[in-house]
Image: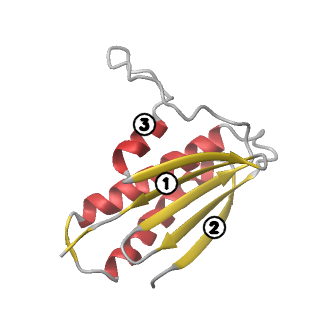
Amino acid sequence: MKDSTITLCLPGNIRFTRLASLTASKTAELFLSSMKVSKGIDDFQHAFELSVSEAFTNAARYASPSSHPQPVTISFRFEEKQLTASITDSNPAFTIEPPAPDIENYPEGGYGLLLIRSLMDTVSCRRENNTNTITMSKQPEIH
């Protein structure tokens, strides 16, 4: 399944987060099944799933009112040695630099992008034509 793309378009509603998460997990599983991965299969799959889930949650949380949610598009791109996910929404622009962690107070929210950056190999954010896109890639350890 080299160099192919799977695209999923979901309503930007928080109730679809689990579907986005499960799809990311199964996509990572499918990607890994075609490779000779030496170790870290569960870690790879979990990191990929959690990152996609977090990006989708942010897109859904900041979407238009839930009565008319704007779509969120998730694209999974299989490449020879890496799996990439892109999450695109038409929400207002967001700050791409996460705040410094406030470990003392454990505030809710604001750390999703920081978490994604810590789990994935590469992460980029862009705003173009009134859309936000977060693109993230991860490579498994291959023997």
Q: Which residue is outermost to the right? A: 68
Q: At numbered mark 1, what does the secondary structure look like: helix, strand or loop?
A: helix
Q: Nearer the viewer, residue 60 or 110?
A: 110
Residue at x 41%, y 44% (from the top left corner): 117
Q: Which mark is residue 114?
A: 3
Residue 114 x/y as whole percent? 42, 36
Instruction: Identify whether 141 is placed above or below 68.
Output: below
| Disc 1: which residue | 52
Q: Amino acid at mark 1?
A: Val
Q: Position of residue 36 (x, y in %)?
A: 24, 80
* Residue 107 spot, x, y in % from top left: 44, 21
**Label 3 SS:** helix
Quarter of the rendering containing residue 61: top right
Say which residue label 2 marks. Answer: 8
Task: Please determine whether, in this image, residue 131 is positioned above or below residue 61.
Answer: below
**Which badge, 3 or 2, comes first in the chain's sequence?**
2
Query: Could you say which quadrant of the image residue 138 lies in?
Result: bottom left
